[in-house]
Amino acid sequence: MKERIFVEEGIKRMQIEEYLANLFERAGYSHCEIQRTPLGLRIAVYAARPGLVIGRRGRNIDKIVEDLKKRFALDNVNLDVREVEVPELDAQVMAREIARALERGINYKRVVNVIMRRIMEHAAGCMIKVSGKLSGELARTEKFFAGYLKHAGEYAETLVRAGKATALLKPGVIGIEVKILPELPTAAQAQRSACGRGERKSRQTSRNQKNHCENTHLPQPEPEVKGNRNMQEMRFTKGTLCLRSD
């Protein structure tokens, strides 16, 4: 019986998430946090442009709260809207921006390059995957990488942020997946700094070896051994013995 209650609660949370995502799509919707309190249900909505969610003088908030109560049979709903501080570090916001740009008819490579440059101004690494009928009749998948990114292990589960979105085009549905690593882990930073020191040391060593080789191969004056005119004159030129008779 308890398991059934938990399943119903999870389904209701998913339905609320989908409803808010469709409602605030233009506002740069990221995600929502649903929490039950002694005073009722508290819903925190994160969006890149919270002004579009709130509306003029908070009119949209009252309408959304009433609609939530009717749709999902909720009581004492408290809706809180919060701004995403850095949208370039939110994978879901970036994925939805790519989807909206594709629906406007912009080339996918141009969109991905622009979004990737914006992300790399704030993040340590990112990956953008676009799947579907990009150009032509056959569907394919293209991946774009930049910076440092972990795909497996503890860092991939705890630090990497992932987001997905879909774009509805005439040829079909285009799927977008975005992964962002906001900052380098401490172990990766130490490894990168050690590699940097090793590269500088190797460069200095190779430079010293090059200078030593240049100094040892400087052109030397040609020694000459002269005798009488009737005798042969020996001359050494660059290590080669030449005999010349007068």
Image: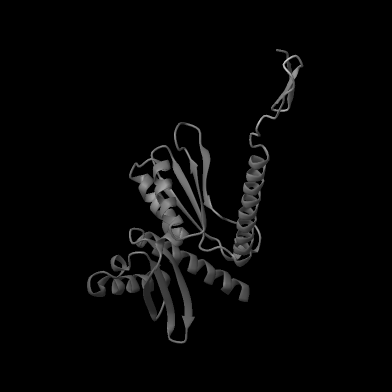
Q: Residue at x 61, y 63 (%)?
A: 155
102 vs 75: above or below: above
* Left or right: residue 84 compared with residue 199: left
Closer-to-camera residue (110/70): 110
Total residue callouts: 0
Quadrant the N terminus occupies? bottom right
Closer-to-camera residue (236/161): 236
* Left or right: residue 130 compared with residue 218: left
Furthest toward the right, the residue is 231
Closer-to-camera residue (230/41): 230
Q: Residue at x 73, y 28 (%)?
A: 239
Closer-to-camera residue (232/219): 232
Quadrant the C terminus occupies? top right
Furthest toward the left, the residue is 56
Furthest toward the bottom, the residue is 38
Q: Residue at x 35, y 62 (%)?
A: 24
Question: In the rendering, at what x and y percent does residue 56 appear?
Answer: 22, 71
> Could one spot residue 1 in this view of the protein?
no
Q: For residue 84, which quarter of the picture?
A: bottom left
Question: In the rendering, at what x and y percent does residue 105 appear?
Answer: 34, 41
Q: Residue at x 43, y 82 (%)?
A: 40
181 vs 141: above or below: below
Question: In the rendering, at what x and y percent does residue 86 appear?
Answer: 41, 65
3 vs 117: above or below: below
> Could one spot residue 188 in this view of the protein?
yes
Question: In the rendering, at what x and y percent does residue 232 appear?
Answer: 76, 17
